[in-house]
Amino acid sequence: MSIEQYQNTFVQQVFADRIGGANYGKDTNIYKFEKIKRAKAAARQAFPDVELIDMGVGEPDEMADAGIVAKLAEEAAKPENRGYADNGIPEFKAAAAQYLADVFKVEGIDPTTEIVHSIGSKPALAMLPSVFINPGDVAILTVPGYPVLGTHTKYVGGEVYNVQLTKENDFLPDLDSIPADIAKRAKLLYLNYPNNPTGASATPEFFAKVVEWAKANEVIVVHDAPYAALTYDGLKPLSFLSTPGAKDVGIELHSLSKSYNMTGWRIGFVAGNPLIVKAFSDVKDNNDSGQFIAIQKAAAYGLANPSITEKIAEKYSRRHDMLVAALNELGFTATKPKGSFFLYVQAPKGIKGGEAFGSGEAFSQFLIREKLISTVPWDDAGSFVRFSVTFEAKGEEQEKRVIEEIKRRLSDVEFEF
């Protein structure tokens, strides 16, 4: 039977309200990334001989370091690594604590009580509302941003309050704008720096204000830091946990996906307040049985070699330089971010004497449809598109070729801003 045929059976009536209840699957709205996927497929079909330049992919374009891969192969062959890992192995936790000290100058983290591994950051974000949110409680999220913690807050009966990230405020949330009644009901404040999609970086002064605000309002801070080690032009990697008092109010989530080209390996860790780490570990223990021990040991090898990330960051920095220069030559106002592999650019209003763009999504669709350049639109706080410098290119010469091709394709129109 097809999906449509099953919609006429009792199965259609028993879905949970959180995913649509009896109307599940009947919503005709198309998710943003599904629209991009469909537009890319249509563009490829219409122009089969033209290369599609994918600047929308939010994952690395290269494999993990050869040393990490070799360590995985070595450890995977050992029979003692075959079993359940549950809440992790001591070697990985110790490596994570040392990594925080070496890269971020975070001292005094107890690997036994203040760190636990996770199967990537996304599952950790999905589980955290179960630790804190009761029906009617509030989680504060920034927009544009990564919605997973908010989605699961709603799943367990909580509410989401959004704070916009604007260029005028350096894409940092204005904590003073949060109404007092929201702050009183809030349990969680989600932050993400360097930020997806804006590429903005936090400052020590901002994190100090976050700690002060969290203490005053008794709110737990969840700092999602998968891009924290990918910084450029002299900016040192910054951890929320390096802020005095941060461990009193929150935790930080790290992932090896972006900083070590280990997206599919699904390994990261939660660090910070020991009571929060313990509670998260209890919920996690009822959700998964831990990541494969060999992966944890390979990840520990990576954490002990942060020069791997430094080399990756050099590549992204170089690509950012080229992309920013190219877009600015075309009339955009692009500013190189200090971290992450995302470049967040205001969408033009239209083409002189031609098509008008009423949103970032309209411009993004134009780029895919007419120029075979894929980006991701964001219209939560102004009309923007996100370029990612993780495009496919082997070596600097190929990188230059891709950027020059973007310039060539966009040079035959004059954008209005």
Image (cartoon, rainbow, N blue to C red):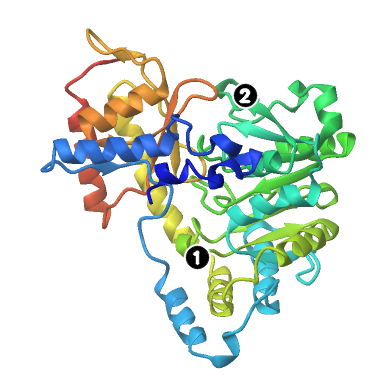
- Disc 2 crowd rating (10 Å Cα; few below 14, some 14-19, many 20+) is few
Q: Is residue 130 visible?
A: yes
In this image, 21 relative to 416: left or right?
right
Question: Horizontal and vertical percent for residue 390?
Answer: 37, 49
Question: Horizontal and vertical percent for residue 400?
Answer: 24, 45
Please tell me which residue lies in front, 153 or 391: 153
In this image, 155 relative to 3: left or right?
right
Write down the residue under mark 2.
169
Question: Horizontal and vertical percent for residue 294?
Answer: 54, 80
In the picture as drawn, the residue positioned furthest to the bottom comes out as 79
Q: What residue type is labelled 1?
A: Ser
Query: Label 2 to label 1, Cα distance in Å?
Result: 33 Å
Please tell me which residue lies in front, 361 or 69: 361
What residue is rendered at 64% in x and 65% in y?
A: 99
What residue is rendered at 68% in x and 42% in y?
A: 155
Q: Which of the 4 quarters of the picture holds residue 349? A: top left
Please tell me which residue lies in front, 341 or 365: 365
Q: Is residue 210 above or below residue 400?
A: above
Q: Which mark is residue 296?
A: none
Q: Is residue 124 above or below residue 318?
A: below
Q: Which of the 4 quarters of the picture holds residue 330? A: top left
In this image, 54 relative to 339: left or right?
left
Q: What residue type is labelled 2?
A: Asn
Write down the residue under mark 1.
307
Q: Can residue 107 be seen in this view?
A: no
Q: Which of the 4 quarters of the picture holds residue 167? A: top right
Q: CB under 8 Å between callouts 2 and 1? A: no
In this image, 13 relative to 58: left or right?
right
What residue is rendered at 27% in x and 53% in y?
A: 393
